[in-house]
């Protein structure tokens, strides 16, 4: 394979409302999904299901929505929009999007989960990987971190927005609900949170393992503004994010319940918890890549 180049500039701040079209974003998403299945296949380890399902959100944020500076990377992110990945096991999609938006060389994706790699199975800060501002993978912590970062921006007069992604199974962690109670009470109105509502977790469907009930009613009871959207439809997703940004002026954070399919984009992976943490074999990889079509593939 030839060395790939980033799909976005690496030396400037990406402005909000970046000019990429939905068609271009779909091509980037297909390339990211190719990265995901190749990364986990290469080491027979990792979490492809949730990564594939959340690809459209991360591509939308990093290539269209957020104002952010890939290089030079600044841990504080002053004057930038910030993103925190709470469900850190879906690191393959996070690493691919960071690399392809210019935070580090795309070729480094080939080191995923290998000894001495900066691309550990769960993102870690001590590896100093650009784009990673908090270690994650111990589930339940991301909403607290994002709330703190958003509140710090408000105190510092920084008008940018903080985004965070959580898994639906992750909502079984009590710390999520402590943060959910705190953020609206303190009027943290520069925070947009997403729940990947794919209905699956490692041991099976969420409703069988630990039913979540009516999430909209629950978050509204905690005084969040709640939106629901199709997380695998880029047009709907972008429209929902724009609506969420507008709602922040009401003085409260926004929770987006994002319906996705685990394994989205690869037909034999879609909708099954069995692909939560299982890598495809050689034959399955080739079948997956045949479905993830990119006009000009730039596989690392």
Image (cartoon, rainbow, N blue to C red):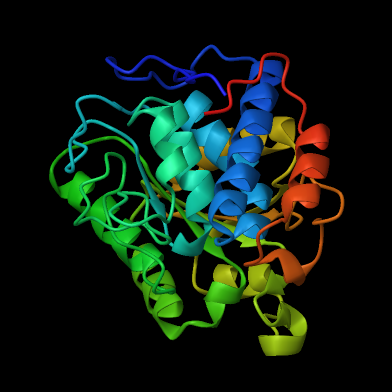
Residue found at x 53% / y 11%? 19
- Whether residue 162 is situated above or below residue 277 in the rendered picture: above
For this view, does 17 lie left or right of residue 50? left
For this view, does 286 lie left or right of residue 7? right
For this view, does 82 lie left or right of residue 36? left
Q: Position of residue 72 (x, y in %)?
A: 19, 26
Looking at the image, which is closer to me, 151 or 260? 260
Which quadrant of the structure image shows residue 50?
Answer: bottom right
Which quadrant of the structure image shows residue 75?
Answer: top left
Residue found at x 78% / y 41%? 286
Residue found at x 75% / y 36%? 289
Q: Position of residue 254 (x, y in %)?
A: 50, 53
- Hey, which residue is sitting farthest bottom in the picture? 209
- Whether residue 73 is situated above or below residue 255 in the rendered picture: above
Specify the quadrant that holds the N terminus: top right
- Whether residue 202 is situated above or below residue 164 in the rendered picture: below
Which quadrant of the structure image shows residue 47?
Answer: bottom right
So how many labels did they put on this image? 0
Q: Position of residue 27 (x, y in %)?
A: 68, 23
Whether residue 66 is visible: no
Q: Position of residue 270 (x, y in %)?
A: 81, 56
Whether residue 144 is visible: yes
Residue found at x 63% / y 29%? 31
Looking at the image, which is closer to me, 60 or 217? 60
- Hey, which residue is sitting farthest right in the picture? 267
């Amino acid at each position: 394979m030839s060395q790939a180049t980033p799909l976005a500039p690496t030396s400037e701040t990406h402005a909000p409302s970046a000019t990429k079209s939905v068609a271009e974003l779909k091509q980037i998403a297909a390339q990211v999904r190719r990265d995901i299945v190749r990364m986990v296949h290469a080491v027979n380890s990792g979490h492809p299901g949730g990564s594939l399902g959340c690809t459209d959100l991360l591509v939308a944020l990093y290539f269209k929505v957020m104002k952010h500076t890939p290089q030079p990377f600044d841990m504080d992110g002053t004057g930038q929009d910030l993103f925190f990945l709470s469900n850190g096991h879906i690191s393959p999609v996070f690493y691919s999007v960071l690399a392809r938006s210019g935070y580090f060389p795309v070729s480094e994706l080939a080191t995923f989960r290998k000894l001495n790699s900066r691309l550990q199975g769960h993102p870690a800060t001590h590896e100093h990987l650009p784009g990673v501002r908090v270690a994650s993978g111990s589930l339940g912590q991301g909403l607290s971190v994002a709330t703190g970062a958003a509140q710090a921006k408000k105190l510092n007069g920084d008008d940018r927005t903080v985004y965070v992604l959580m898994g639906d199974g992750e909502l079984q962690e009590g710390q999520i609900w402590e943060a959910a109670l705190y953020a609206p009470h303190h009027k943290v109105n520069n925070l947009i949170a997403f729940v990947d509502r794919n209905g699956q977790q490692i041991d099976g469907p969420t409703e069988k393992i630990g039913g979540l009930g009516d999430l909209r009613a629950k978050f509204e009871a905690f005084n969040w503004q709640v939106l629901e959207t199709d997380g695998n439809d880029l047009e709907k997703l972008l429209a929902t994010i724009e609506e969420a940004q507008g709602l922040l002026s009401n003085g409260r954070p926004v929770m987006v319940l994002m319906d996705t399919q685990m394994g989205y984009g690869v037909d034999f992976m879609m909708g099954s918890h069995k692909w939560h943490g299982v890598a495809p074999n050689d034959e399955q990889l080739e079948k997956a890549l045949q479905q993830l079509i990119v006009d000009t593939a730039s596989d690392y």
